[in-house]
Amino acid sequence: MRQIVFIASEATPLAKTGGLADVAGSLPHALQTLDYQVTVIIPYYRRDIDDSGFTPAATDIVIDMWADGRQWLCPVHELWHDGLRFLLIEQDELFDREGIYGPPGGAYEDNLLRFLLFDRVALETAARLDRKIDIIHCHDWQTGLVPVLLRTQYIHLPAIASAKTVFTIHNLAYQGFFPAEWLHRLGLPSHHFHPEGFEFHHQINCMKAGIMESDAITTVSPSYAEEIMTPEYGCHLEGFLANHADRLTGIVNGIDIRQWDPAHDQHIAAPFAAGRTAGKKVCKQALQEQCGLHVDAAAPVLTLISRLAEQKGIDLLLANAGAWIKRGYQLVILGSGDPYCEHALHELASRYPQSMYFWRGFNEPLARQIYAGGDIFLMPSRFEPCGLGQLMAMRYGNVPVVRATGGLKDTVIDYHQDKQHATGIHFANADAASFDTAVETAVALYRKPGIWNRIRSNALKRDSSWEASARSYARLYEQLLAS
């Protein structure tokens, strides 16, 4: 049985800020059904993990690590969840903090120390698992230095020395930039600090390190793999990525369809599924009542669950929201982020309390109720490596209107391109008028029950499970191991 180690900065259900956690926590389950043995290593974020009700057990592994002029003692804890083994690296001074990456709206200045220490301890932990490791799968900038360390400073450890490395880019916009002074403070291999290595305008770039040294690079959708080699989406690394394009593959994400299942979801007002959708109407009425909206089965309920940021196109929604409300549409929005966006959404909800509801923050039961009760799901992202919201929305028959970018384009079948198999609506340009036109198209289709029921049924039937993605990763692993 092949031995796979995932090294990631977060993983569901233990610690999560975004889609990276869903991949690190869900993909291993699907890989284990294909006869891989997977171990997931993450930091021990004590307040997040303990508050979630999990109780990790101490192991006999304790790593003593020198970094930034002092010794750090790092005990390793173990937790099994749903058949998957998690190993948690304890270092409370670094990881028992508010926020995984920083306080609200910021980042910790010592993040390179935090995650480089984690990377080193994770490699030493992997080397002590009493088995030869075949693949080390790393995720985003926080683990970008793992392949470099493995090929330089940890090549002497027999259990991991021959392991192949896979580096997954979840969002190229976050690259992990740090001053060059950390090179010597943390003992990084300085011979890789040059423009073809992990140097970027005289700074350390952790994303470049992963791209440079890993045996394979993946990103979370085929379209995003193409987009990041263009100036528009490449975040100044398009040329560097093009030089490594022979190792780059796009594999679309999935979701855990056991966890996201409207036929068995205990948080929604009534169960439903493809072919038996009466419960969907019950869920819509319940959502309207819960949110204080005018209860009207005919009014289209537009929904959005998102981080409130420019990337997500929230300004395009704000530009149109007032007009949509005046046309008789209802809006239910869940999210947090940019203070200006939060304030603007609060103002709209206060002005139109029977037509719009805004919940600041994240609330998973409410998110499920929004997916289940909504008619049209909005994702006007300027770029979207994969996106999970549209997958969850389709799973709950909430038809997505998405900008045709990255994983949104790859996972949502556009009505204009394939009327028979459509699962949603695309729009091309990231401007308010194009978004409004797409929403108007969706509402017009919503008012034609025969067409809408087919689109919604297609969405409900879409296979968004991890199985197909896991098979693609398995093929990649086997190709690496055979080379």
Image (spheres, rainbow, N blue to C red):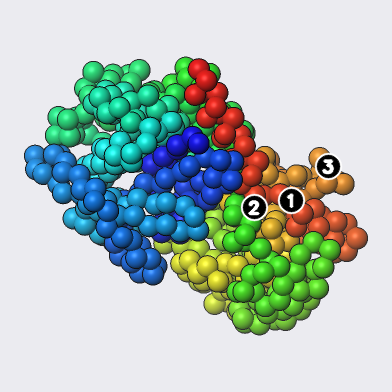
Q: Residues within 10 Å of mark 1 (few under 14, many from 20)?
A: some
In this rendering, would 196 be left or right of 23? left
Label pair 1/2, CB-CB below 8 angstroms = yes
Query: Marks 2/3: CA distance?
Result: 18 Å
Q: Is residue 217 visible?
A: yes
Front: mark 2 or 3: 2
Q: Nearer the viewer, mark 3 or mark 1?
A: 1
> Label 2 sits on what residue type?
Leu
What residue is pinned by disc 3? 418
In this view, the residue in front, 183 or 33, is: 33
Q: Earlier in the sequence, mark 1 or mark 2?
A: 2
Where's residue 449, x and y in %?
88, 63
Task: Give the secondary structure at mark 2.
Answer: helix
Q: Is residue 51 above or below residue 227?
A: below
Instruction: Look at the picture and state if 366 lies above or below 433.
Output: below
Q: Are marks 2 and 3 in contact (CB under 8 Å)?
A: no
Which residue is the site of mark 2? 391
Give, as a three-letter code, the residue at label 1: Arg
Q: Which residue is mark 1?
A: 462
Q: Residue drawn at (47%, 17%), measured in percent from left and top?
A: 243
In the picture shown, does residue 456 fall above or below 164? below
Is residue 185 rendered to the left or right of residue 277?
left
Q: Quadrant of residue 227?
A: top right
Question: Residue at coordinates 42% horizontally, 51% vertically from top-left?
Answer: 85
